Image (cartoon, helix red, strand yellow):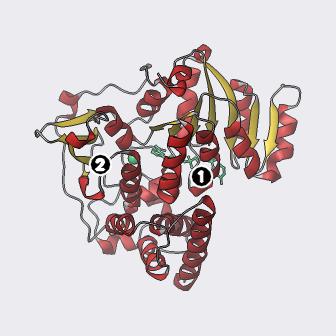
Amino acid sequence: MGEALRQAMEAPRSVAVLGATGSIGCNTLDLIRRNRSAYVVEALTANRNVNLLIAQALEFKPKLAVIGDEAQYGALKEALAGSGIEAAAGPAAVSDAAARPAQWVMAAIVGAAGLQPTLTALRRGAVVALANKECLVCAGGLMMREVERHGAVLLPVDSEHNAIFQVFDFERPERVERIILTASGGPFRTWSRQEMAQVSPAQAVAHPNWEMGAKISVDSATMFNKGLELIEAYHLFPVRPEQIEVLVHPQSVVHSLVAYVDGSVLAQMGTPDMRTPIAYTLGWPDRVPAPAARLNLAHIGTLEFTAPDHERFPALSLARHALAEGGSAPTVLNAANEVAVAGFLARKIGFLHIAEIVQTTLETLPARSLASLDDVMAADHEARHQADEIMRELEP
Ligand code: NAD
Ligand code: MG
């Protein structure tokens, strides 16, 4: 039994939650709250929502609470004075939180901003529950090498990857024919391009099945989320890109599937509640209870499946192309998408411009090889700058 595994089975489990105030962070703390004595909270971090971080710190009594936004440090420090909880601020302090000796770390920061702290946790051989898919997309090769080198354990939280992780035969990967990621299709699954051209941020963020942060909700609406997940799956599982398929499934009950050489197809199912995949990682290698509504297939009655429409949703093809291209192409795709989604949420551009900006950024910047974290950061930075320029030209 590996060291990480042995530690993982010791109780109570010490945990850190990076991105504690977000949708995944709050769901994680909800599970911890339900079995408080099983966990010791080492550290909690947030970016701007200092009031929620303060409330969480006072409830969960971490040793350290970190706010990314330095302007909020005073408020955090004052509220935690006399509590015995250390307060800190700034991006470096977020990574310090990841360096604390928690056995289990929830990586739930949104975007490439989560890369540095996630790497910090991996480099000390922690069990890392990964929600933050953008860091695998922008630096997957590098991250997986660090997992290997430091004997860390990376457990996917993303519901599709968590599903595949549960049914993938890691001992006989050559017996896997393909993996099938399901996609809800988002709020505009049946809409025309013309209709999509007019949508507001509020419409894009209103996901039919899942309650999530704004960025991933927009990604679900454009289907960039599935594009990012395609690249995420490539790094997490020993499969070739052409073995990864996408299937639209509006009910979000079948969370993903693994097809074997004998024709067997194994799926993991459940109601759409992130507390189930989070609980899988929190309890791993055991299983712990989660309060999600129980799946009642008789009540649901019908499950639908359709092939994705690449004409209306170009994001999937762009991601597949970036994955085939390799090197910095996925880093560029992710960075350009982050810039474009922020621009859309700020009402600077229209919904369809998001994929246009990503495509033009990819076309403008030739893919380079990525040998180091500095290379990743440089490619990310350059792509953000380029995407910003392209966006400026589109602004009304
Ligand atoms: P969210 O926006 O609700 O929360 C993001 C969290 O990260 C917040 O705590 C925020 O304070 C923190 N944060 C944001 N920017 C930061 C920065 N620059 N530095 C430090 N901290 C920062 O997002 P979410 O929906 O919880 O998603 C988090 C991650 O999990 C994303 O990568 C998303 O793709 C992934 N994910 C989410 C869901 C879901 O159901 N919400 C499902 C699968 C995967
Ligand atoms: Mg997902």
Which residue is farthest front?
A: 149
Any part of residue 213 in sight: no
Nearer to the camera, 219 or 281: 281
Front of the two marks 1 and 2: 1
Name the residue carrying label 1. 115
> For the point 17% across and 34% down, which residue is it?
301
Q: Report if the beta carbon of the residue with label 2 is closer than 8 angstroms to ligand 2.
A: no
> For the point 41% across and 50% down, which residue is it?
235
* Image quarter of the C terminus: bottom right
- Left or right position of 321 against 290: left
Count of number-bearing discs? 2
Any part of residue 360 in sight: yes
SS state under label 2: strand
> For the point 18% across and 28% down, which residue is it?
298
Q: Position of residue 385 (x, y in %)?
A: 61, 75
Q: Position of residue 222 (x, y in %)?
A: 39, 63
- Left or right position of 17 against 330: right
SS state under label 1: helix
Name the residue carrying label 2. 181
Residue 176 location, quadrant: top left
Classify 10 Å Cα crowding around label 1: few (below 14), some (14-19), many (20 and above).
many
